[in-house]
Image: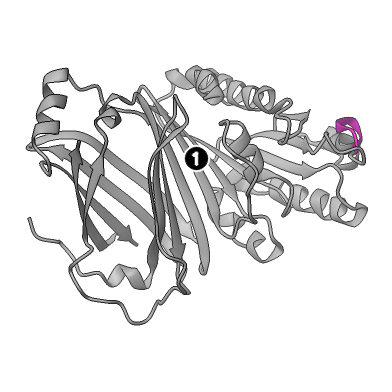
Amino acid sequence: MQFLCSQAGYRLVQFLEFSIKNEDTNEMLFQLKRPEIPLNWEDIDPAEEGRTVNYKFPISFLQAKNIGTTLTFAVGPKELSSFRMIERHYFRDRLLKSFDFTFGFCIPNTVNTWEHIYEVPALDEKTKKEMVLSPGQTVSDSFYFVDNKLVLHNKASYSYC
Amino acid sequence: MGLLTIIKKLKARERETRILMLGLDNAGKTTILKRINGEDISTISPTLGFNIKTLEHKGYKLNIWDVGGQKSIRTYWRNYFEQTDGLVWVVDSADRPDRLEDCKRELKELLKEERLAGASLLIFANKQDLSTALSFEQIKDLLELDSIQTHHWHIEGCSAVTGKNLLAGMDWIVDDIASRMFSLD
């Protein structure tokens, strides 16, 4: 599937950090931090590379029952009157989890965080095994909307080993 | 996951529950938010925008919004009033007298807000671990809480550092929200 919009949204909002924690054991499962360089809101790199992230997780990741994801993002010089994220996770054609979160208003020139703590959808052992044996076939699409307009679309794929 | 046991009370409700945490800068809002979930509180910097914590459990959701309290950000608070079920007002009980006056004034302004009219109000008299802190009774008098007629309110002396009374306070506000919704049904 193609990307459904350009990356113009990076003039409005940029992601700084993403982490995943096992809420039951407090163990940090994953952490991705952007290098601390000054944010640029004018010249957006139009390169398509980087729009798809390939995550590699240890197999134990699939055993976590409750996880907490934290997204840290910066808002540029322009205020956002309505910001919303929709994300869908699939294994092959099967929808595993769907997120729909409305941040609403975002203050210009700010750094904001959203932590989401939830139960991982229960998967049978057979499916988990298939997911491990099929690297890259667990995927997600993240859609970001500003004022009901799609401004960013990113993809990710997941491997467990 | 101390909050989980509390939000189970909200099971009966269909829509998401929204709690808004406000207060002057350096009152301890973000520290409280992290502490109630057992997170590290050693490196907390001033909140420039917001921190949201969403707890999702068996299909029901609790969203807690912690919005920065610096003077330049306070003008944006009104953007977060919509659909608020509970307001948590955090006070630095060891703050300077003039700041406590600001604190009282800002709270009074909030309580006039139509969009917060139905919200339960919890006041956290934070930093009770400091020797210079006023007691929660003193904070209650100083903020003239007894004169509040428009909101269900409750004050809890607490410490985000030790964790004292944080869950008790959250328990009260979630209970109050849940019972109010129940009585509407």
Quarter occupied by the C terminus of chain A? top left
Viewer-nearest residue: B4 or A102: B4
Which residue occupies 59% across, 39% down? B40
Chain name for mark 1: B
The spot of residue B141 in percent (x, y) is 90, 36
Say which quarter of the image contains residue B61.
top left
Residue at the disc numbered 1: B53
Picture layout, residue A123 above or below residue A154: above
Quarter occupied by the N terminus of chain A? bottom left
Picture layout, residue A133 above or below residue B95: above
The spot of residue B128 in percent (x, y) is 83, 34
Q: Left of B100 or right of it: where is A124?
A: left
The spot of residue B133 in percent (x, y) is 89, 39
Say which quarter of the image contains residue B88.
top right
The spot of residue B14 in percent (x, y) is 39, 26
Q: Left of A102 or right of it: where is B39?
A: right
Q: Which residues are magenta?
A: B134-138
Which residue occupies 24% across, 47% down? A55
Q: Amino acid at mark 1?
A: Lys
Query: Majority secondary structure of the magenta segment?
Result: helix
